[in-house]
């Protein structure tokens, strides 16, 4: 029988042991629609033979993923049930699902530690499509800093080259990348994605040649473009130290360079944070012995075994709660449909019907007047 997460001995995961050498945690971030999940799949394929990545999916709202995940948040938290119980919208549901997952951060970190001992040199983490719910939420900060204080951690920002052809969109991407860099304080890479759809040469030109970017801006005449011209002057220093990757061969080499950068520049910072956390745990209040008495424990619902490999690129893994059910289950779901939503649909259809009836009456009246005028 597979060893479950609930049987993990958390005493093995101690901050006093210092930052481990492996696995290297790679956080994949990017704007919605930039291709993070597809990028993650290809990164896993290119790194499989040499680095044997340990794969984590932290997007509770995705329906399917094109890779085999060792840890999947959808096995822990039912995203749709969270929205229903707490009456939340899509983004609120994602934030709450991440918060619930973070309650098992210690077990998750222990799984990552054991993965390193089993030969996984990298841990690739795919994040939610809505970038803001991870980068600017408390749970996102806990996951990022928690991993960085125990393992070498880097950030890969996936940039959609096709959409960034617009200077304003390009500047928005760069400003977001800059904010993430200074917020996470970790080695940072920009991966130019979808270069098969559009050549990425203009991106490199705009980063290195201020006048080339200004020429592209001349085609736009709006308040936003004027703001973009001003903001572009402030990013020169950001561009100078930015690592930009084109193609996976270059990306893999840049990742190794970023690991060395973490060891020399960032590890001392997180070592200091680790010591501060140790001091706080020594002087602060003791943790609660029985979590169930003070709150609701969220089961992680994972095993420590590797997931079955995919047999082809066309096969997708699906969360149990999202697998298509039988017709009987579908009938039950239809019976449980929200009465408020049904009433709103009826009101909308009634409004449309009344509007169409009024329009038809106006047309009939106009036609009758025209016929009378002709007579």
Image (spheres, grey):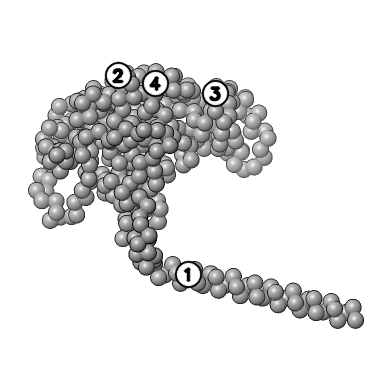
Res. 132 mark: none
Question: Which residue is pictured at 66% across the width and 38% down the height?
Answer: 220
Alpha carbon separation for disc pair 2 and 1: 59 Å
Work out whether mark 3 precedes mark 2 in sequence or the reverse, and give the earlier one: 3
Q: Nearer the viewer, mark 3 or mark 1?
A: 1
Residue at coordinates 55% horizontally, 70% vertically from top-left?
349
Instruction: Report if the CB atoms under discs 2 and 1 are less than 8 Å apart.
Output: no
Within 10 angstroms of label 4, few (less than 14), some, or many (20 or more) residues?
A: some
**Circle on res. 264:** 2
Q: Which mark is residue 204?
A: 3
Few, some or many residues within 10 Å of mark 2 (<14, 14–19, 20+): few
Nearest to the observer: residue 221 or residue 111 = 111
Q: Which residue is mark 1?
A: 344
Residue shown at the point (23%, 23%) measured from the top left: 119
Q: Position of residue 213 (x, y in %)?
A: 60, 28
Camera-nearest label, 3 or 2: 3
Left or right placement of residue 33 versus residue 96 in this view? right
Residue behind mark 4: 252
């Amino acid at each position: 029988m597979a060893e479950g997460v609930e049987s993990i001995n958390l005493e093995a995961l101690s901050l006093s042991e210092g930052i481990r050498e492996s696995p290297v945690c790679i956080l994949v971030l990017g704007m919605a629609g930039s291709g993070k999940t597809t990028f993650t799949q290809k990164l896993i394929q290119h790194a499989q033979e040499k680095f044997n990545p340990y794969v984590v999916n932290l997007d509770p709202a995705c329906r399917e993923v094109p890779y085999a995940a060792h840890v999947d948040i959808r096995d822990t938290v039912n995203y749709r049930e969270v929205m229903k119980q707490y009456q939340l919208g899509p983004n609120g549901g994602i934030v709450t699902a991440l918060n619930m997952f973070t309650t098992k951060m210690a077990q998750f970190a222990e799984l990552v530690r054991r993965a390193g001992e089993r030969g996984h040199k990298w841990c690739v983490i795919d994040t939610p499509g809505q970038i803001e719910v991870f980068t600017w939420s408390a749970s996102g900060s806990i996951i990022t800093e928690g991993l960085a204080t125990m393992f070498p951690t880097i950030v890969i920002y996936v940039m959609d080259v096709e959409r960034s052809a617009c200077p304003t969109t390009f500047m928005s991407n760069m400003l977001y990348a800059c904010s993430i860099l200074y917020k996470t304080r970790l080695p940072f890479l920009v991966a130019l994605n979808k270069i098969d759809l559009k050549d990425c040469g203009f991106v490199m030109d705009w980063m290195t040649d201020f006048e080339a970017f200004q020429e592209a801006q001349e085609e736009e005449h709006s308040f936003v473009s004027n703001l973009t011209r001003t903001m572009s002057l402030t990013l020169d220093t950001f561009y100078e130290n930015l690592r930009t990757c084109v193609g996976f061969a270059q990306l893999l080499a840049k990742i190794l360079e970023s690991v060395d950068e973490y060891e020399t520049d960032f590890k001392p910072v997180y070592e200091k944070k680790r010591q501060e956390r140790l001091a706080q745990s020594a002087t602060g209040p003791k943790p609660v012995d029985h979590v169930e008495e003070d709150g609701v424990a969220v089961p992680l619902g994972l095993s420590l075994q590797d997931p079955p490999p995919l047999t082809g690129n066309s096969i997708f893994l699906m969360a149990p709660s999202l697998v298509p059910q039988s017709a009987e289950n579908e009938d039950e779901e239809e019976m449980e449909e929200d009465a408020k939503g049904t009433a709103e649909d009826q009101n909308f259809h009634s409004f449309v019907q009344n509007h169409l009836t009024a329009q038809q009456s106006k047309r009939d009246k106009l036609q009758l007047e025209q016929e009378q005028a002709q007579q």
